[in-house]
Amino acid sequence: MGDMLLINGTVVGRDRLIPNGFVHICDGKIKAFGEQGEIPEITPDMEVIDTCGAYIAPGFVDIHCHGGGGVWSFHQPYEFAVAHLLHGTTSILPTLTYNESREETRQGVLEIKNAIYSDAPYRSAIVGIHLEGPYINKKYGAVTSPIRPVDPEEYNELLSLAGEEIKLWTLAPELDGQYEFAIAAARYGIALSVGHSEATAEQIYRLVPLGLQVGCHCTNASGTTPSPSSFLGTREVGVDEAVLVHDDLYAEVIPDKLGIHVRPLMLKLIHKTKGTDRVIIITDGMPDSGLADPDEPDVNYNYKGALAGSKLTMDGAVRNMMKHASVGIVDAFRMSATNPAVVIGMEHEIGSIEQGKWANIILVDEEIHVQAVILRGEMIK
């Protein structure tokens, strides 16, 4: 790896835009960034790239994605990651669903772990594993047959197999045995996510000291307790409300084009309530992610006709978020890069353009069309 200098672009910083900015990359990491007048001396061995006015932004970090490029993330994790990489996602968590048997879950975890430690050229785009289940509430699964009770033998096996690689684990706090499971996961520093659940606020908040940080795809597959309400004509506090109220919890959102997963007004409410620092944009992508015609809906339905994830890539999700929730580009990249990096404990390496971090950078226009992708200082696209 050598020197690369990106010039004549608008740098998307954590808190502000830097017009006429530059980013200096050395040995795969960000050496410096700033305004044009601070550009370092150009040497003969430096690759200078004129961005022609593009936004120079951190690569997306997608912590909830099941497939893409025609494959499942836990069957062909490398091919999956490359498919999303071409759309600007430089860090991704291949995500298992709750539809796998115990053996299929174990095999999927092994496949992802093997990809992380392979010698494939773009393996660094895979930064860990997300397990969405299987310990979720059967009432809130699009497919319920493989969902199973909390099993210490199974989760201890998975933790032993890949505890260091598992960055996020989604669960329903109301199930028996979840507190003990959370204690076990906390030993590995795994962030927990409440999802496919009708847990009470008290059940959710009890797990916060043990690492529960995320509300899984808010307004999707979430309920209230009791249901129906204690008083006719009223609404109980549910999972989504509990997530919105707690200052330390992040809210995941799936901003699809038609506002099916999250209505545009609801996106505005979530952003207004949580603030930019506590919202995370995800795709919840399925194998068709990245393959859909731009004019087609970007949601996904399973064989039962139930809404099941999306066909989104992160560039589209961010574009939709900016449109539906009226957020600017700085906030959009905070929610799609910085915040997810914080949740998975990797903010010191990825998620923003800062000195010493990996040079995971994308060039985009104002409508988030990806023009170039740089992974650890190497031009990919």
Image (cartoon, helix red, strand yellow):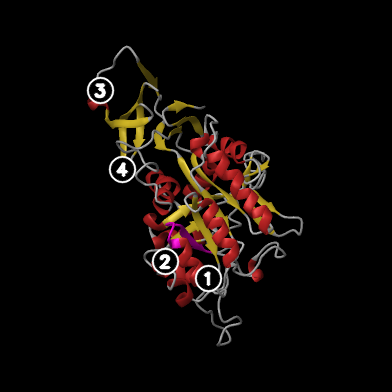
Q: Secondary structure at mark 3?
A: loop
Question: In the rendered structure, which disc, 3 or 2, sits on the residue that comes first in sequence?
Answer: 3
Residue 16 disc label = 4
Q: Which residue is mark 3?
A: 40
Identify which amino acid the numbered label 4 is placed on: Arg
Label 3 crowd (10 A; few <14 / some 14-19 / many >=20): few
Which range is magenta? 186-194
211 to the left or right of 300 = left
Identify which amino acid the numbered label 2 is placed on: Leu
Q: Which residue is mark 1?
A: 178
Q: Nearer the viewer, residue 66 or 336?
A: 66
Q: Which residue: 55% across, 33% down? A: 86
Based on the picture, tell me whether residue 268 belongs to the magenta stretch: no
- Label 3, label 1: how far apart the Cα atoms are: 53 Å
Above or below residue 86? Residue 47 is above
Q: Nearer the viewer, residue 119 or 273?
A: 119
228 to the left or right of 186 = right
Q: Which residue is situated farthest in the top direction here?
A: 44
- Label 1, label 4: how far apart the Cα atoms are: 41 Å
